[in-house]
Image (cartoon, rainbow, N blue to C red):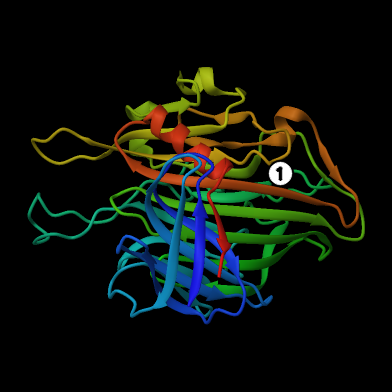
Amino acid sequence: MTRLRITASTPITNTVVMGELEAVPEGAYEAATDDGRSLPAQVTSLSDGRSLVGVLVPELAAGQSLDVTLRETEATAGKGIDLDDQPENGRIVVNYSGFLQTIYHYGAMNFKPRFYPITVPCAKMGPMEDFGTQYPKGITDDSPPDHIWHRSLWYACGDVNGVDFYLENGGEGRTVHQRFRDVFSGPVFGGFRQELDWITPDGKRLVHDERRFMMYRRKGIERVFDIEAAFTATDQPATFGQTNENALPLIRVNDSIDEWDGGQITLEGGIVGGKDAQAKRAKWADYSGPLIRKPDKDAEWWGIAMLDHPHNRNHPNAWFARSYGPLGTNLPFFDGPLTLQPGETWHLRHRIVVHDGAADVGKLESHWQTYAEPPQIEVIS
């Protein structure tokens, strides 16, 4: 049996603690504590020989440690993160405890991959005609009439060495899927590792792109997942131009929660409103609004937040925030063109939090602290 020690740098609540292990078989586990509790756990083997371990920890104080013993168990039916790769459809369907959470569209028919929809965690709970019934609702928008190239949650750049990888009028460059190194599911976490290339209209490869996605199981209705991109210049320098037409990355929220329809943008520190948030530097940004409306009931507010990792270049990044729906980071626009020499890599890491209600500044700050200083796992026997 494998003994682990989990140590929190900052206070954590309801958090999947991740680490790497060697020589532990893949599968569902329980993490047995010394006081008799059983915590959900998972080990996943990756194609590069590493094994990821995750343990869902209810709570730890800053500086506190928890020792657990890994024991194999049966996966809990209907619980966890399930990824269904459908290459014939060019997409990965991500389900959370049996309900749709998002779909990652990567097929050749797309100018660039994107996550759409991203749902809030409602579930069917009655007949369709009953106003009390709840279904998953999308909190993002894809290809809205005002900006058909806005793609829910995505990466793009309007100027890489003069080539447009942002618009979708027919003559632009494309971000082309090459392969998935890993696609994995489980009772505690699920995700993928992907390789792509940025291809010009005349077939030149300007940038090699490696992406990661990881979603974590939690108790309650919050949803948390991480997205990462690593852009590497190929055989010539690659310059990401100083244009507002960048998604590095960008969220386009559902029209019903944008500020033109009663929603609200909030930045770290309590800055409110797209006008005041535009170009401001902050560790995180949130877009929340009245997503679900039912007859004779108050509108239900839901929100989606993006957290900027402290290892990102020029952190905290400035935010591109617009009252009609877009929210994200855009380093070249605010800080000037970024040129990568051949073989040089630009890493981008962000965490996405889907939550109920308006932005809770204290709770989002806690999310960011956990993201910036994650708890650690070590093997002790």
Q: Position of residue 341 (x, y in %)?
A: 90, 50
Q: Where is residue 133 in the image (x, y as percent from the top left)?
A: 13, 54
Whether residue 130 is visible, yes or no, is: yes
Is residue 331 or residue 283 the one in the foreground? 283
Residue for badge 1: 158
Residue at 52% across / 46% down in the picture? 351
Q: Position of residue 97 (x, y in %)?
A: 31, 66
Is residue 301 or residue 131 the one in the foreground? 301
The quadrant holding residue 273 is: top left
Residue at 33% across / 31% down in the picture? 358
Residue 211 horizontal side relative to residue 54, left or right: right
Residue at 48% across / 56% down in the picture? 17
Quadrant holding the C terminus: bottom right
Q: How crowded is mark 1: few (under 14 residues within 10 Å), some or many (20 or more)?
A: many
The quadrant holding residue 71 is: bottom left
Vertical arrangement, residue 345 with respect to residue 270, above or below: below
Residue 308 horizontal side relative to residue 355, left or right: right
Residue at 35% across / 79% down in the picture? 73
